[in-house]
């Protein structure tokens, strides 16, 4: 029998084939081939596991239409940040080698059911999908590209929040990215925000919740501060489903929850609506 691993595992032991995936939600064991063919969604409880940016591209875009933009924008250790685990500069290098990407967001253009769009896809493998200066710059430049070409803009968020190694520089990205979205809004160019697990911190507090349409995957954790911090602050016990996509839908912060396998068709339907003659 092969090794058992959780859906969050990113590496396999050398020379040993993995046969099973263990669902993080219901703890059931699922054949890896079945897990992958079901788009990293548990067939037993519908738990939506993590996906890489490459997998997201394959899921959403018409075959062969995606073209990456702004791939030369990379993070820089402007503050010379060091902690007990080493320098931020070294962490950038090792994370890039391990993940195969050079920032926490991939930006590009492509077609969804024939409709041209600009997209920014966050990837949790790169420092927890954190929002750094280069992340914000790529998201802004993609917004400006959408503005120039009048293409709908989609951001798919998966993030732990602002990047602590960049201090206040990371917090500035909240305002910068929102300013880019505001330009699209002024020109009536649609912005669609897709919220996946997790979407938290400064990302939730900025562009992730600014969509003309806010869509979430089932069960996604979406919020700003953590549950424990909020409970300690207000001195009350929070509901069990607090900060889930379902809770936000019930309270009007999310417009629709869409299963991963239905996401492309749903987005295509939305884009057809936007592209109807006025």
Image (cartoon, rainbow, N blue to C red):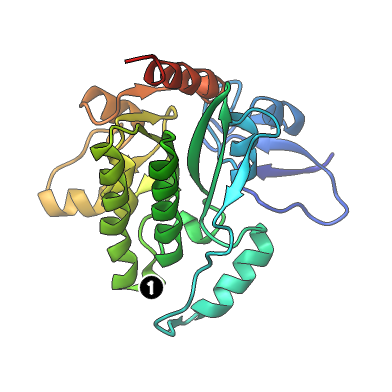
- The answer to whether any part of residue 255 appears in the image is yes
Q: Is residue 78 above or below residue 187?
A: below
Which image quarter holds the N terminus? top right
| Residue located 68% across and 30% down the image | 35
- Residue found at x 34% / y 40%: 222
| Pointer 1 local density, CA inside 10 Å: few below 14, some 14–19, many at least 20 | many
Q: Work out which residue is located at the far left of the displayed protein and give it.
A: 234
Q: Quick one: quadrant of the C terminus?
A: top left
Where residue 143 sits: x, y (%)?
Answer: 39, 47
* Residue 148 against residue 126 in the figure, above or below: above
User: Is 42 located above or below residue 161 in the figure?
Assistant: above
Q: How many labels sit on residues?
A: 1
| Residue 99 placement: quadrant | bottom right
Instruction: Give residue 74's position: percent from left, percent from top.
Output: 53, 67
Q: Is residue 248 left or right of residue 136?
A: left
Mark 1, secondary structure of its residue: helix
Q: Nearer the viewer, residue 198 or 134?
A: 134
Residue 250: horizontal and vertical position, in percent? Answer: 24, 23
Instruction: Report the residue marked by disc 1.
Output: 166
- Asked if residue 201 can be seen in this view, the reply is no
From the viewer's side, name the closer residue of 257 and 152: 152
Q: Where residue 72 sits in the image (x, y, percent)?
A: 58, 64
Q: Nearer the viewer, residue 90 or 12?
A: 90
């Amino acid at each position: 029998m092969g090794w058992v691993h959780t859906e969050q595992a990113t590496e396999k032991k050398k020379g040993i084939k993995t046969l099973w995936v263990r669902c993080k939600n219901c703890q059931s064991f699922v054949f890896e081939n079945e897990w992958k063919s079901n788009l990293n969604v548990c067939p037993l409880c519908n738990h939506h596991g993590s996906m890489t940016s490459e997998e997201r591209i394959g899921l959403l875009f018409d075959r062969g239409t995606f073209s990456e933009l702004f791939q030369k924008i990379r993070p820089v250790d402007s503050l010379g940040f060091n902690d007990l685990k080493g320098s931020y500069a070294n962490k950038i290098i090792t994370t890039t080698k391990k993940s195969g990407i050079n920032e926490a967001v991939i930006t590009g253009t492509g077609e969804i059911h024939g409709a041209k769009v600009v997209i920014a896809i966050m990837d949790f493998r790169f420092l927890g999908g954190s929002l750094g200066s280069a992340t914000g710059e790529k998201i802004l430049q993609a917004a400006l590209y959408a503005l120039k070409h009048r293409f709908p803009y989609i951001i798919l968020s998966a993030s732990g929040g602002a990047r602590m190694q960049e201090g206040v520089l990371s917090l500035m990205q909240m305002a910068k990215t929102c300013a880019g979205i505001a330009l699209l809004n002024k020109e009536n160019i649609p912005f669609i925000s897709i919220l996946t697990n997790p979407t938290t911190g400064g990302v939730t507090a900025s562009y992730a919740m600014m969509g003309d349409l806010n869509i979430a995957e089932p069960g996604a954790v979406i919020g700003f501060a953590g549950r424990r911090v909020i409970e300690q602050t207000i001195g009350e016990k929070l509901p069990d489903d607090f900060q889930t996509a379902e809770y936000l839908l019930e309270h009007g912060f999310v417009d629709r929850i869409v299963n991963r396998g239905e996401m492309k068709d749903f987005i295509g339907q939305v884009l057809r609506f936007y592209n109807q003659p006025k």
